[in-house]
Image (cartoon, rainbow, N blue to C red):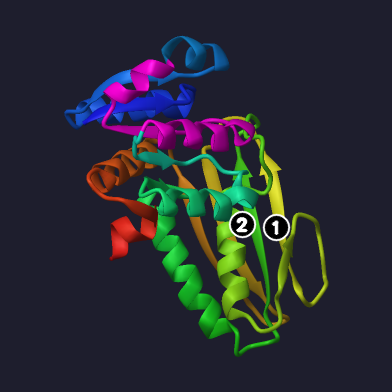
């Protein structure tokens, strides 16, 4: 594949390394509005784009790829208020897009376990659920997109919970998400069900960005040649 990298920070560089190891070619690197100004016409030379940028730039990046009829895989989070709008544009115009709050295979297995566990725990009202996520200090959005995905999947299956909050909360209808930022932490997510007699916890800890990069490249390989709007679970579990 000929890949356009949109966002060339630490993740972009890790994706570049992984893509080259798997026999792909990087034909464009975009990391600023100036890069877009100087190299937008080169986007058409790519077979697919992999986008890990900033929340405030993401939707505009998607539209540029749609306009060039370039499939796009994105791992940027913080833009999900526009998700339905982006999905509508993608589907109505026969474009191709795959988004994920986390491309790690391990995290996507965690998503599946979390959904199953939330169904089981819905029967036991004496357990209160909470989420904790820890990332590096350069991560802008809080809570993380992964934590939001975990919370929303619990809400779908829990009769008592109808919202998540990024604060400490004892409200019966809320899932509290605690966000921690520390140096040199790639990503840690845990879901805890706590009662007076015991607690149950599931957790994923990323050792490096390599797992995210590998997942993103695998997703791009899977998406190439397809049209539609997809998630990482379509790649791994369908």
On the image, the x and y values in percent for residue 13 come to 40, 23
Residue 81, label in figure: none
On the image, the x and y values in percent for residue 232 come to 38, 54
How crowded is the residue under tag 1: few (<14 C-alpha within 10 Å), some, or many (20+)? many
Q: Residue 57 magenta-drawn? A: yes
Is mark 2 in CB contact (under 8 Å) with mark 1? yes
Per the model, the C-alpha gap separating discs 2 and 1 is 8 Å
On the image, the x and y values in percent for residue 190 come to 57, 59
Q: Where are the magenta residues, as a range? A: 40-68
Horizontally, is 143 left or right of 66 in the view? right
Which residue lies under the disc numbered 2?
A: 148
Quadrant of res 172: bottom right
* Image vertical order of residue 145 relative to residue 195, above or below: above
* Image vertical order of residue 60 relative to residue 33, above or below: below
Quadrant of res 58: top right
Residue placed most toward the observer, 212 or 78: 78
Q: Residue at x 60, y 66 (%)?
A: 152
Q: Is residue 206 visible?
A: yes
Q: Residue 224 magenta-drawn? A: no
Residue 177, label in figure: 1
Horizontally, is 15 left or right of 166 in the view? left
Q: Residue at x 52, y 39 (%)?
A: 76
């Amino acid at each position: 594949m000929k890949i356009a990298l949109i966002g060339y920070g630490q993740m972009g560089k890790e994706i570049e390394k992984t893509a080259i190891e798997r026999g792909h070619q990087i034909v464009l690197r975009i990391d600023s509005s100036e890069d877009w100004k100087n190299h937008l016409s080169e986007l058409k030379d790519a077979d697919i784009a992999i986008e890990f940028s900033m929340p405030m730039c993401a939707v505009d990046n998607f539209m540029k790829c749609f306009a060039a009829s370039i499939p796009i895989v994105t791992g940027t989070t913080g833009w999900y208020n526009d998700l339905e709008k982006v999905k509508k544009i993608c589907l109505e115009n026969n474009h191709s897009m795959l988004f994920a709050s986390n491309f790690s295979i391990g995290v996507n297995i965690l998503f599946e376990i979390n959904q199953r566990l939330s169904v089981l725990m819905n029967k036991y009202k004496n357990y209160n659920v909470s989420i904790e996520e820890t990332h590096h200090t350069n991560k802008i959005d809080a809570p993380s997109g992964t934590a939001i995905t975990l919370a929303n999947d619990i809400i779908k299956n829990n009769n008592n919970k109808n919202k998540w909050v990024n604060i400490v909360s004892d409200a019966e209808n809320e899932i509290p998400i605690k966000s921690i930022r520390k140096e040199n932490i790639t990503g840690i997510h845990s879901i805890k069900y706590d009662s007076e007699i015991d607690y149950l916890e599931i957790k994923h800890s990323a050792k490096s960005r390599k797992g995210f990069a590998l997942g993103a490249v695998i997703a791009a390989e899977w998406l190439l040649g397809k049209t539609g709007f997809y998630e990482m679970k379509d790649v791994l579990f369908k």
